[in-house]
């Protein structure tokens, strides 16, 4: 029965083009998602190494440690920042972005 369906799709050219276009789109989405995952992973490693382990004397150490404590938390934080780029929690944290211009450039 499945072979009959494939034979039918071969005769209907527009359906054939639509089906293979869908397969190509799924492949493209897979590779973009994989690339995004690798980029998020590398950036989260950078953020954990720089912002996740600040000394306790830093006024923003508790906030940054809660956002970038480990790789998983950092990846989730960066994904949220990527999907909503208005930086609401970082703007409300008094003086965080202005005292760290490299963090501001990285998040933008």
Image (tube, rainbow, N blue to C red):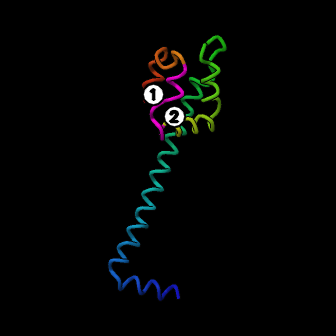
Question: What residue is at 53 percent from the left and 88 percent from the top?
Answer: 1
Tell me the element at label 2.
helix
Mark 1 crowdedness (10 Å alpha carbons): few <14, some 14-19, many ≥20:
few
**Near-viewer residue (49 or 99):** 99
Q: How far apart are marks 2 and 1 (CA)?
A: 9 Å
Quarter that holds the C terminus: top left
**Near-viewer residue (85 or 16):** 85
Disc 1: which residue: 106
Is the Cβ of the residue at disc 2 closer than 8 Å to that at disc 1? yes
Q: Where is residue 96 in the image (x, y as percent from the top left)?
A: 52, 18
Left or right: where 13 falls relative to 35: left
Left or right: where 44 falls relative to 55: left
Tell me the element at label 1.
helix
Residue extending furthest toward the right? 56
Q: Where is residue 34 in the image (x, y as percent from the top left)?
A: 50, 50
Return the mark for residue 11. Answer: none
Tell me, yes or no, whether the highlighted magenta stretch contains residue 25: no
Question: What residue is at 55 percent from the left and 28 percent from the top?
Answer: 47
Start and end of the magenta stretch? 82-93
């Amino acid at each position: 029965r499945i072979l009959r369906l494939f034979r039918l799709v071969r005769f209907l050219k527009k359906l054939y083009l639509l089906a293979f276009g869908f397969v190509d789109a799924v492949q493209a989405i897979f590779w973009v998602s994989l690339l995004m995952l690798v980029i998020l992973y590398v950036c989260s490693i950078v953020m954990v190494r720089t912002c996740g382990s600040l000394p306790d004397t830093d006024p923003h150490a508790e906030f940054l440690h809660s956002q970038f404590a480990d790789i998983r938390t950092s990846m989730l934080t960066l994904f949220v920042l990527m999907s909503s780029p208005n930086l609401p929690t970082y703007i409300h944290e008094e003086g965080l972005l202005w005292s760290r211009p490299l963090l501001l450039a990285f998040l933008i």
